[in-house]
Image: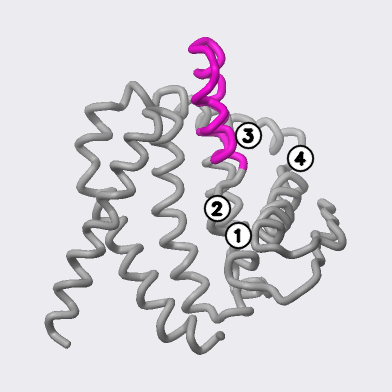
Amino acid sequence: MKVLCTFAGAPLLLLLAFAFGDSLWQGYGAFVENWKIFQFEFYGVVAYFALRVVLFAFRRNLEFAETFCHELNHTVFAVLTFHKVESFFAHADEGGQVTFYGNTNPVISLAPYTFPLFAFVMAWISLILIPEARIVAQGLVGFFLMFHLVSVFHEARPRQTDLKEFGYAFSYAAILFANLFWVPVVAWLSAGGVSLAWAWAKSGFEVAWNWGTYLWSFV
């Protein structure tokens, strides 16, 4: 499984990552034109950093929240891939652990680094709220997206056993692609709805398809 991920999965994920990175770059103009629909998400990002400054001033941090979210991601994707969860543990100083029946898989192992769980849930909630409440939810989407990205920066280190499980090449390629995919998708979903999120995701896959077709022509 590790060999397959390294020699087949990693190159594919890198292709997708570069394709979505290119799509993100090409879509910069659309972002600038529609910046107002993202303004409350931006306020949420600012609120996240403001909270970190306040916590730092009081010699506190978000370590427990990051650990809890990390283990919750493992738990959610263990359940989604039909594993029965046995135990859940999260502690600010002692770390955390989730145990479940059956073997792990890349989706479970890399879930905390690849999927902005809280932001994703909040983005869907924002779509069904009245306008006055929706702007608050959009702010929370921005907050949780930044929370996720900073958590990934803190946690995605070589010492993590999650990353060793299926090889560093595959793991880091998956993390890069997943964040280039999910973070913009969630941002567009909350700010512009399903149609805009789908349009952006589709553009990235179209770039990947075109690149893949071009590379295949040399085989």
Kind of residue indicated by mark 2: Phe
Establish if 115 lies above or below 195: below
Numbered disc total: 4
Specify the label residue 111 is tagged with: 1
Q: Going from the N terminus, do you reach mark 2 or mark 3 first? A: 3
User: As drawn, is 193 to the left or to the right of 68?
Assistant: left
Region in magenta: 118-144
User: As drawn, is 17 to the left or to the right of 208?
Assistant: right
Q: What residue sits right under mark 2 in the picture?
A: 115
Q: CA distance from mark 4 to mark 2?
A: 25 Å
Q: What residue sits right under mark 4 in the picture?
A: 60
Q: At x 52% / y 41%, what residue is drawn?
A: 145
Establish if 125 lies above or below 147: above
> Do labels 2 and 3 touch, CB within 8 Å?
no
Kind of residue indicated by mark 4: Arg
Kind of residue indicated by mark 3: Val
Q: At x 47% / y 78%, what residue is drawn?
A: 169
Specify the label residue 53 is tagged with: 3
Q: Position of residue 42 (x, y in %)?
A: 44, 29
Q: Going from the N terminus, do you reach mark 4 or mark 3 first? A: 3
